[in-house]
Amino acid sequence: MIKAGQIDKGMGLLIKGAPYIVVEREFVNPGKGSAFVRLKLKSPTTGQTLQETIKSQDSVEDIEVVDHNYQYSYNDGEYFHMIDEDTYEDTPVQMSMFEGYELLMKEGESYRCTTYNDEIIDIQIPSKVVYLVAEAEEAIKGDTVQGATKFVTTETGLRVRVPIFIKQGEKIRVNTETKEYLERVND
């Protein structure tokens, strides 16, 4: 248990029986009445945010969440198989907890994961990732309208709208939050 006044950003708390990470913390000391802490919490398992106000003298249950590197091995349609980079242990993670991540994660890549009770509760994907274009429509000659775009499919199956000059086999940088094309990458 930890006093509300000791809560800090990035800490793990158990609220209503579920783990949450403190995203924002504001200490408020009004002229009248007792001080309190206003928290913005995020559930790593559902992505849901929660606002909580706790009196500074009250206690809440803190939990130990650990960030650790895991290598994404493969998915079997139901689970992501993540390999602990220290112990080489396979840790299956339900794909339903991380909907859409199968299109963003690349096999063999390392990801920072948050664990609680030896269970992965969050996978942190970089905001910008380089993907190989696996399929691209051919640009039609004469289709040179300014800003003309087409869809391509990356090695992971992600469909991205890109400029018409992008070809199959090229690499592109994509913003993983918006799933938008950023630039062509030349090695």
Image (tube, grey):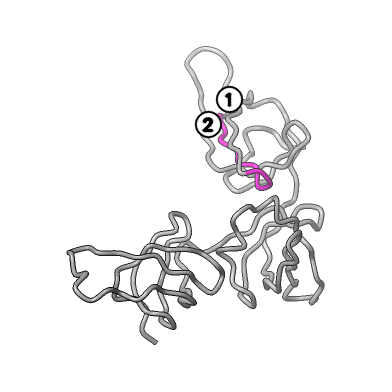
In the rendered image, the quadrant that contains the N terminus is top right
Horizontal and vertical percent for residue 82? 73, 68
Q: Is residue 39 magenta?
A: yes
At 81% from the left edge and 58% from the top edge, which residue is drawn?
118
Residue position for label 2: 27
Considering only order in the chain, which callout, 2 or 1, is on the residue closer to the N terminus?
2
Please name the amino acid that badge 2 sits on. Answer: Phe
Part of the protein shown in magenta: 38-46
Horizontal and vertical percent for residue 168? 42, 80
Considering depth in this image, is 100 or 24 the residue closer to the camera? 100
Left or right? Give the position of 33 relative to 93: left
Tell which residue pokes out farthest to the bottom in this image. 187
Between the residue at mark 1 and the residue at mark 2, the CA separation in whole angstroms equals 6 Å
Contact between marks 1 and 2 (CB within 8 A): the answer is yes
In the rendered image, the quadrant that contains the C terminus is bottom left
| Res 106 → quadrant | bottom right
- Which label belongs to residue 36? 1
